[in-house]
Image: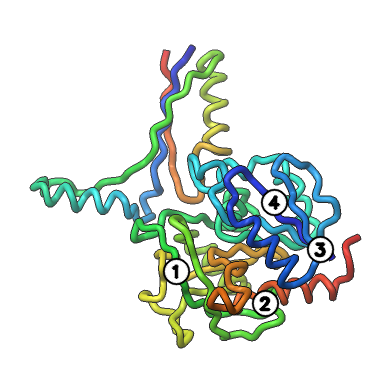
């Protein structure tokens, strides 16, 4: 059964308050080379069906529920 | 006149809303279970505060697909009244009944305290019994109340006078310091295009009796009761 990995992140135009706090913490640890931190969600699913059908279904799932298109972007990978 | 308070798993302001309508305002009110598919002729639906479905995934994201929400959508389409308070506002945004979204508070903290709101318009069924520019003291209690929308949507809301409440200070001045959660343009509450749906983060049901520190929330309930009376009892 194909394993699907979905990555959901805030749109780049929105300030990611959580990411900013973590970025500051990394700077405090001395990692001055960290230019940006964005924190998102990682969803792993086992989805039955041929990869083409799975890809179509997962796109629908993202648009309907897994991501909010008003504030978030998503991408996903369909495994073997 | 009949009000209906929807109960999702995890709603926790449902009893407050029910109590205020029944005991403070003396109107007919009933609970509506999230699995119900009918609203049984209520005039106004209240989507209460709380943490529906544990706020899993995103606030309101799962509640939006509850069976009752199709009935709520039909109610909205008929021009009937719906108010979403706090989590209810989040549900209405997720359902695309109201534009925009509510994100994690800018300060990352759950804020539970009294705030001041300026009434930006009384040209809504929710504020018709009050005056523009009036300052209301009503508490907030949320971790995800930062209202965001793209610039075009915000401009449309401004032009159509659909921003109903903005966070302000005690003098009614809308300032960055009076914004408790980072909401764009200090937005605390908006209506839909038809003005029959209001979403707001603050809790008017917690500010309807003097013993609780403020009665300013009454303005919203008095307005909607007046609006329902004006349009006649439910068909």
Mark-to-mark CA distance, 2 and 3? 21 Å
Residue A25 appears in the picture as rendered: yes
Check the residue under mark 3 and report the chain it is in. B
Q: Nearer the viewer, residue B30 or A73?
A: B30
Q: Specify the label residue B113 is tagged with.
A: 1
Q: Nearer the viewer, residue A43 or B130?
A: B130
- Residue A23: percent from left, percent from top: 21, 49
Q: Which residue is mark 4?
A: B6
In this view, the mark in front (2 or 1)? 1
Q: Specify the label residue B28 is tagged with.
A: 3
Outermost residue toward the front? B211
Q: Secondary structure at mark 2?
A: loop
Query: Would you call the spot at circle 3 few (<14 residues within 10 Å), some (14-19), or many (20 or more)?
Result: some
Q: In this rendering, is residue B176 above or below B172?
A: above
Tell which circle, 3 or 4, labels the residue nearer the N-terminal end.
4
Is label 3 on the same chain as label 4? yes
Q: In this rendering, is residue B187 above or below A70?
A: below
Mark-to-mark CA distance, 2 and 4? 22 Å
Q: Secondary structure at mark 1?
A: strand
State the residue at coordinates (41%, 17%): A79
């Amino acid at each position: 059964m194909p394993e699907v990995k979905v990555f959901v992140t805030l749109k780049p135009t929105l300030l990611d308050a959580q990411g900013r706090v973590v970025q500051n913490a990394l700077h405090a640890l001395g990692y001055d080379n960290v230019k940006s931190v964005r924190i998102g969600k990682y969803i792993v699913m086992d989805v039955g069906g041929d990869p083409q059908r799975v890809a179509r279904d997962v796109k629908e799932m993202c648009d309907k529920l897994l991501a909010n298109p008003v504030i978030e972007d998503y991408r996903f990978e369909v495994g073997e | 006149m009949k009000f209906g308070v929807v109960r999702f798993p995890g709603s926790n302001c449902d009893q407050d809303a029910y109590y205020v309508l029944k005991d403070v305002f003396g109107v007919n009110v009933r609970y509506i279970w999230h699995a119900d598919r009918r609203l049984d002729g209520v005039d106004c639906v209240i989507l209460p505060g709380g943490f529906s479905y544990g706020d899993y995934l995103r606030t309101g994201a799962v509640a939006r697909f509850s069976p009752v929400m199709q009935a709520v959508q039909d109610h909205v389409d008929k021009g009937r009244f719906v108010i979403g308070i706090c989590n209810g506002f989040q549900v209405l945004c997720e359902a695309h009944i109201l534009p925009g979204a509510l994100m994690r508070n800018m300060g990352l903290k759950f804020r539970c305290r009294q705030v001041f709101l300026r009434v930006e318009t009384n040209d809504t069924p929710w504020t018709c019994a009050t005056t523009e520019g009036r300052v209301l003291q009503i508490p907030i209690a949320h971790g995800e109340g930062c209202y965001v929308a793209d610039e075009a949507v915000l401009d449309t809301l401004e032009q159509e006078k659909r921003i109903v409440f903005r966070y302000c200070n005690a003098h009614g001045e809308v300032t960055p310091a009076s914004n408790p959660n980072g909401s764009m343009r200090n937005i605390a509450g908006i209506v839909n295009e038809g003005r029959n749906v209001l979403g707001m983060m603050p809790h008017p049901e917690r500010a309807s009796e003097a013993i609780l520190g403020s009665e300013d929330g009454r303005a919203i309930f008095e307005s909607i009761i007046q609006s329902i009376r004006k349009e006649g009892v439910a068909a």
